[in-house]
Amino acid sequence: MGGPLEGVRVLDLGRYQAGPRCGLMLYRLGADVIKIEPPQGEESRTNGQHYWVQYNSGKRSLGLNLYSKEGKNILSELVKTADIFIQNFRPGVISTIGFSYEKLKELNPKIVMVNVSAYGQFGPYKDRVGFDPIGQAISGLMTTQGTEGMDPFKCSFPLIDRITALHATIGALSALWESRVSGEGQSLDVCLADTGYTTAEIPISTYLKTGAAPRRTGNGNTFTNTYQCKDGWVYLISTGPRMWKRAAEVVGKKEWIDDEKYATRQGRTENAVEIEKYLSQWFSEKTRDEVINLFSQHGVPIQKINTIAEAAHDPHMRERNIIEEIDDYITDAPNVSRINAIGDIFHFSRSGYQIGHAPTPGEHSREVLSEILNLSEEELDALHAEEVI
């Protein structure tokens, strides 16, 4: 079966990551997502195919000059047929182009507009530009990672972009559902800075209540930490008194269970040096598989810390189709090779999902305009000659 959003049309004017990732999620869920980009292609294409495919695979590309009168007219007509409109220009830019929410609402009262930006459509920094790390910076998240005394530390993957995209997707689907009831669409405003604050919500809440800022604890200690084995690293998580007791039994330290100085989390933290010294030696004498089997048998969470090479061949990822091979028409053009992209992350019991290749710039311009707006070949030729498409 098709995805649950089959029949939903999305106009995706997103650039770089957070906006396009929202469009990608809607496409995977079955929507027809039309990537509207300049005729020469959206600027983030220059970041490479392995980057671009993760945010745009399966979408139909319409290369459209939005600064031309004809281009604006075409987008206006498409808006009348769409359910969701995504954009992540700086606040005010989309209005300057001529497609504010008020204009979209005139064209299509049921349209849901998704606005994604660095600091939001209102607020003290709304006119500033920004990318993923600004959310990590403004929220204090960079100062909570690593160990005491380290410089601020940035997460190595676009955590803020990804979560912002999920906020945008959830908001879009909620507004789409409500529009089917009320008959009226609405706009939503999500941003990287807001997302950053959600990632630091616990330490911020604690500080506002107590005035105490959290210490940087690295990967943890006393059975919740990284440990090096003979053949690599593992991560162990032992939370709560029951798991602590199980973990102590696994490493041959039953006497710790009844020792008063280890009875509480605070006590174990105060004696962390002694505990960690023993654990480091214990783990170093065993393989990863040995310790994973031991702890797993006792119901204590543990897993290998894979290298990227190991993660790429992990059976979990392949068996659940998290990453799938798709056609690559860009990297080796004019030849077609294969490239990996995000696959099925929903696993519905009835509905399916969509996956397809990353489009070349304007690959589907004629298809989209002839199919949706019924433009003739002669009209399409004229628009191409005028560099509108």
Image (spheres, rainbow, N blue to C red):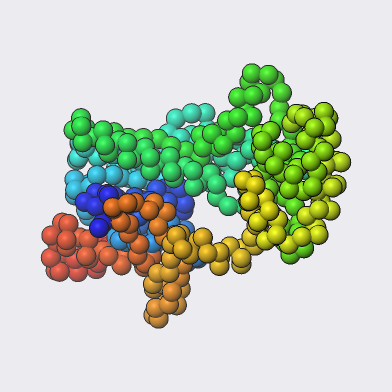
Q: Is residue 272 above or below residue 226?
A: above
Q: Residue lying furthest bottom in this view?
A: 335
Looking at the rendering, which quadrant does residue 133 occupy? top right
Left or right: residue 355 compared with residue 102: right
Residue at screen point 34% across, 51% down: 348
Residue 326 shows in the view: yes
In the image shown, does 267 or 356 lie closer to the viewer?
A: 267
Looking at the rendering, which quadrant does residue 269 occupy? top right
Residue at screen point 38% across, 53% down: 347
Q: Is residue 130 above or below residue 370?
A: above
In the image shown, does 279 or 335 lie closer to the viewer?
A: 279
Looking at the rendering, which quadrant does residue 342 occupy? bottom left
Left or right: residue 124 compared with residue 232: left
Residue 228 screen position, x and y as percent:
76, 56
Residue at screen point 75% across, 29% down: 264
Residue at screen point 32% across, 40% down: 173
Q: How many marks?
A: 0
Left or right: residue 362 compared with residue 108: right
Residue 36 shows in the view: no
Residue 387 screen position, x and y as percent:
28, 64
Quadrant position of the C terminus in the picture: bottom left
Quadrant position of the N terminus in the picture: bottom left
Residue 291 screen position, x and y as percent:
70, 56
Residue 355 screen position, x and y as percent:
35, 62
Q: Is residue 321 above or below residue 153?
A: below
Q: Residue lying furthest top in this view?
A: 209
